[in-house]
Image (cartoon, rainbow, N blue to C red):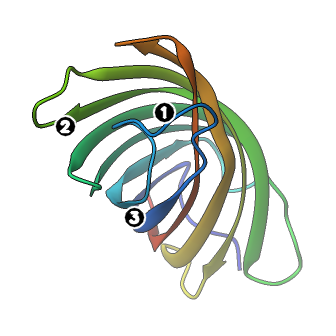
Amino acid sequence: MTPAGSNGIRPVIGVSGHLDVDFPTAVGGNKFLFGVDYFIGSAYGLTAVISMHLGAGGRAFLIHPIFSLVYRFQLPIPLIPYVGGGAGVKLGFQRGTSTNFAITFRGQVGVEWFFTPSVGLSTELALPDIGPLIAPTAGVVGTVEWTIGPHFRF
């Protein structure tokens, strides 16, 4: 069964784990994640993904827009594994401190299982999501992220 449409949307929930290299910041740390991924491209092959992930935890709130390119492999079963990479910007807000700003780079691996041509379930691991902290000080920050959610093709 081939997934329908040339685009898809995937609401996600997940978690991020602490991988701060230099010191704890509002853009790193352990957080509960929620957001949406928008897939632009066919069901298989190279696909662009525009994402907006939000996070909360460690007395901080995170805004994380991401742009990724993923390659989705075609199998004879309705399972679609994929690998890719991307970049994003992290803005972290924490009461009593200045806003944290970081640029991050990620490798990602995931799998989707479609039980109808338009509806599936997917999970993704982003490892690592790491990059330079720009403000309020210079440093290196990072997280490991795992998300899961339904995938709707149209």
**What residue is rendered at 39% in x and 32% in y?**
65
Local crowd size for mark 1, using a 10 Å CA cut-off: few (<14), some (14–19), many (≥20): many
Please state if 102 lies on the left or on the right of 110 as rendered.
Answer: left
**What residue is rendered at 57% in x and 41% in y?**
20
Q: What amino acid does circle 1 point to?
A: Ile
Label tally: 3
Local crowd size for mark 3, using a 10 Å CA cut-off: few (<14), some (14–19), many (≥20): many
Measured Cα–Cα span from mark 3 to mark 1: 14 Å
The percent position of residue 93, horizontal first and vertical second, equals 21, 33
**What residue is rendered at 42% in x and 11% in y?**
137
Secondary structure under tag 2 reads strand
Secondary structure under tag 3 reads strand
Number of the label disc, if any, that sits on residue 94: 2
Secondary structure under tag 1 reads strand
Which tag, 2 or 3, sits closer to the chain's start? 3
Q: Would residue 46 be visible to someone looking at this image?
A: no
- Nearer to the camera, 28 or 117: 28
Q: What amino acid does circle 3 point to?
A: Val
Give the labeled residue for mark 3.
12
Q: Residue furthest left?
A: 96
Q: What amino acid does circle 2 point to?
A: Gln
The percent position of residue 85, horizontal first and vertical second, equals 72, 37
Which tag, 3 or 1, sits closer to the chain's start? 3
In the picture shown, does residue 147 fall above or below 49? below
Please state which of the two labelled residues, at mark 2 or mark 3, is closer to the viewer. 2
Give the labeled residue for mark 1.
66
In the picture shown, does residue 69 fall above or below 60? above
